[in-house]
């Protein structure tokens, strides 16, 4: 057991002329280094920073190997955090309770200090801690397929989306003259087109108009890397619904 920093500090600091104070979010990295968000309340001048130390636990020597401070300086008198990402970037939450000004509360920076992203709240709001993680949105509902037949359109259009789902890479648009159970009968569908997802809601013009058939259905399929995620409900566009099962 040992104590690093503060009044009962047991360590020697090298390459460091500013003891950290009121710090938050101390973490030991896989390489044994220590990262800290240094609020800097007791330093002069007051500013906050992200700092990393190489630890020699045998001789109790902490060597500063990296730090980041904003330009101009920011001072978060409380809270805050520092997260090292797998790509070497760092996510810094600048803390600071109830600041009157509107300032970024989170920055992502490279090892060289290049700012890649910043987020901010309105004035007098803050975040205790911010972190970044890989995630994807899911939905308990199926994709939605709708038909737009407004007279202002040159052709009828299919519109489709899947609200909240983030890992869609492409869509398949199918047609069928019979009502099928999906995905069990997928091989019976007629593939009309495949579309790469580029926006929240995709559309597809029916340049030949609607099929003039007693029974006809459209359905779309969401895919990720060629793997089916889900089908929309079948949408009937035939001429004689009473004849269709």
Image (cartoon, grey):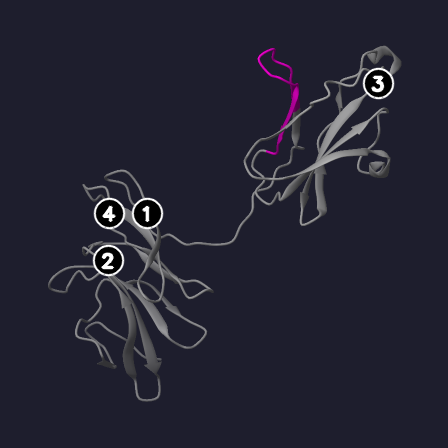
Question: Residue 162: horizontal and vertical position, in percent?
Answer: 61, 34
Rendered image quadrant of residue 54: bottom left
Distance between the Cα atoms at labels 3 and 1?
56 Å
Rendered image: mark on residue 224: none
Tag 2, which secondary structure? loop
Distance between the Cα atoms at labels 3 and 2?
65 Å
Mark toward the viewer: 2 or 4: 2
N-term-proximal mark, 3 vs 4: 4
Q: Which residue is mark 4?
A: 97
Q: Which residue is mark 1?
A: 127
Q: Is residue 24 left or right of residue 138?
A: left
Tag 1, which secondary structure? loop
Q: Is residue 230 left or right of residue 56?
A: right
Distance between the Cα atoms at labels 2 and 4?
18 Å
Residue at figure coordinates x 19%, y 42% from the top left = 101
Mark toward the viewer: 3 or 1: 3
Residues drawn in magenta: 146-162
N-term-proximal mark, 2 vs 4: 2
Question: Residue 24: horizontal and vertical position, in percent?
Answer: 30, 61
Q: Which residue is mark 2?
A: 70
Rendered image: mark on residue 215: 3
Cβ atoms at labels 3 and 1 below 8 Å apart:
no
């Amino acid at each position: 057991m040992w104590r690093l920093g503060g009044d009962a500090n047991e360590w020697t600091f090298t390459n460091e002329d500013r003891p950290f104070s009121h710090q938050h979010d101390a973490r030991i990295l896989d390489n044994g280094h220590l990262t800290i968000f240094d609020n800097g309340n007791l330093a002069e001048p007051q500013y906050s920073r992200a700092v990393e130390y190489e630890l020699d636990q045998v001789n109790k020597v902490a060597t500063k190997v990296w730090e980041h401070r904003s330009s101009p300086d920011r001072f978060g008198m409380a809270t805050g955090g520092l997260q090292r990402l797998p790509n070497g970037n760092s996510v810094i939450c600048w803390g600071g309770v109830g600041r009157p000004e509107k300032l970024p509360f989170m920055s992502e920076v490279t090892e060289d200090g290049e700012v890649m992203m910043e987020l901010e709240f309105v004035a007098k709001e803050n975040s205790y801690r911010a972190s970044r993680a890989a995630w994807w949105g899911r939905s308990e509902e199926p994709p939605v397929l709708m038909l737009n037949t407004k007279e202002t359109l040159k052709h009828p259009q299919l519109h489709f989306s899947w609200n909240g789902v983030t890992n869609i890479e492409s869509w398949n648009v199918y047609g069928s003259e019979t009502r099928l159970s999906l995905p069990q009968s997928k091989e019976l569908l007629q593939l009309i087109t495949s579309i790469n997802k580029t926006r929240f809601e995709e559309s597809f013009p029916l340049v030949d108009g609607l099929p003039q058939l007693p029974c006809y259905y459209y359905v779309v399929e969401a895919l990720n890397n060629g793997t089916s995620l889900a089908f929309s409900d079948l949408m009937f566009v035939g001429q004689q619904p009473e004849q269709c099962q």
